[in-house]
Amino acid sequence: MDIISQLQEQVNTIAAIAFNTFGTLQRDAPPVRLSPSYPEPPAPAAATATNAAAAAANPTTEESPSNNISETPKVLSAELVKAAKQFDALVAALPFSEGGEEAQVKKIAELQAENDLVGQELQKQLEAAEKELKQVQELFNEAADNCLNLKKPD
């Protein structure tokens, strides 16, 4: 895989990690009261029953590290920093541009001229192939007509 594809893949990885980080933090964040004068909303009966059933099914009071809200941001941010460092390493591996902007513009112009020449050659080959195809189709039609026009001997 070339360096540009690796960079694109790493950007996608960083975006996925960020997306998952924000989603996880939003999902796991404890509720916060908007203001002291704002009343607490009543707890839905279904949620209370679900929480009670889950607590009864899992009697341990110790949280696993993956469910610990204070550890989650640290783990997710470490993943994000690791992905960013990998991206920086890929950027550092990019070839250095010699000659500055003027040399790059000159190289782009040369490559564009070469591309135009190759495009013209391909266009000529396409036209020749279309002409040959037309001739083959005419010969095929003529041969088919001749076969159809043959009469059976008496």
Image (spheres, rainbow, N blue to C red):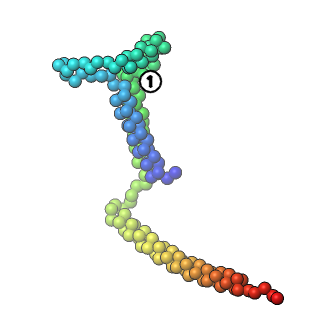
In this view of the protein, which residue sits in the foreground, 59 or 15?
A: 59
Measuring from the top left, give residue 62's x and y in whole percent.
44, 13
Nearer to us in this view, 43 or 96 = 43
The residue that appears at 68% across and 81% down in the rendered structure is 144
Looking at the image, can residue 62 be seen? no
| Residue drawn at 47 percent across, 73 percent down | 119
Q: Nearer the viewer, residue 106 or 35?
A: 35
Q: Amino acid at mark 1?
A: Ser
* Left or right of residue 106: residue 6: right
- Percent across and percent down for residue 57 are 48, 14
Q: Quadrant of residue 139?
A: bottom right
Most extreme residue toward the right is 154
Q: Is residue 21 above or below residue 34?
A: below
Looking at the image, which is closer to me, 11 or 127?
127
Query: Could you tell me which secondary element the residue under label 1 belongs to?
Result: loop
Residue underneath mark 1:
66
